[in-house]
Image (tube, grey):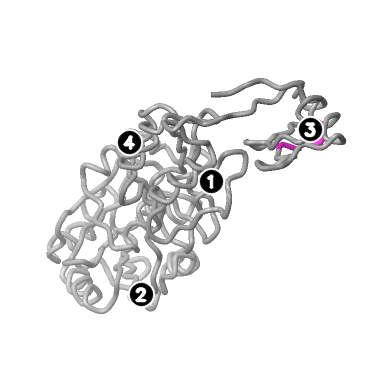
Amino acid sequence: MAKIVKVEDAIGEMLLHDITKVDPEKGFKGRIFKKGHVIREEDVKTLKDVGKDHIYVFELDKDEVHENDAAIALSKEIAGENTYCSKEPKEGKITIYADCSGVCKVDVEKLYRFNSIGEPSCPTIYNNSVVEKGDKLAAVRIISLMAPKNEVDKALEVAKGGIVKVVPFEKRSAGLIVTGNEVYHGRIKDKFFEKLKPKLKELQCDLKTREILPDDKERIRDKIVEFSKEYDLVILSGGTSVDPDDVTYKAVKEAGVEGFVRGNPIQPGNMLTFGYIKDTPVVAVPAAALFFKKTAFDLWLPRFLIGERVTKEEVLKRAHGGLLEAIKDIR
């Protein structure tokens, strides 16, 4: 229940919600009065300047929940592992942050059911986004100043167990196998090692060693098997084009790689090839990684490094948004 009171008559009344000011000229949007503030005579002009000629004084029924109380309760259920919430609501909203660097996992199906209830609202960042500690993951609130208790209870049940979490990056190691007669015989210099090492380091993976091999399927195959036992990630470069004499992808398959995926509908990096030997990802990176800042390799790399298995079905679905060179960011 609510009643409308003129601002002039509201001196001594307590605000039951934040008052926000928007000033496009100064680039400001934020709270100027906090929930619980007792209106003073000198506040009347400020309130009128932001269009508040009247304020609402609420008397919550037993079957209603105030926006701040709802946001606090809902955020506690939504926030999963390696996240934390803002200390108090601001403009009726609680923000959820990453508590470490890693990959943000969003339960998209649960999120849909949560937002389908009515008053509860929770936008998030994209599932599988790479995040740093302190990055925003989600914002939780109800649409109105108060919500039916049954809707809040339903949303709490849906959110139980968490909707957003962060899978942290851990210290990992990688070995690089550079293939190609032209590199092996010194006709050209390998550029992959210096290109990939800092990229992996950003994700807490140390590129330990590089082995340069000729286009010899058996030697490449045996080195893949060896590296899969020594390192958390095996990377190969060269020999993944459509030329019939390219042997790298054949060596990958003969090494006993499971979940083998040759090529993906993502550009740049169409010829990315990967699979797993037990739990170790084996990834053949095409030459596009030398020329473009972001390729298919960058899309899947964070997932490899948190121990997830990427399936062929998922790769095919990623064609939507797979034209990486035409979008500003990848997820």
Classify residue 176 by image quadrant. Answer: bottom left
Say which mark, if any, is on residue 11.
Answer: 3
Kindly check if marks 3 and 1 are in contact, taking CB atoms under 8 A apart as contact: no
Q: Position of residue 288 (x, y in %)?
A: 42, 51
- CA gap between label 1 and label 2 equals 38 Å
Report the Cα–Cα distance between label 4 and label 2: 45 Å
Foreground mark, 1 or 2, reads 1
Q: Nearer the viewer, mark 3 or mark 1?
A: 3
Over which residues does the magenta segment extend? 25-29
| Residue that mark 1 sits on | 94
In the image, which is nearer the foreground, mark 4 or mark 2? 4
Side of 215 where 95 appears, left or right: right
- Mark 3: which amino acid? Ile
Q: Is residue 26 magenta?
A: yes
**Rendered image quadrant of residue 169:** bottom left
- Asked if labels 4 and 3 touch by Cβ distance under 8 angstroms, the answer is no
Q: Which mark is residue 139?
A: none
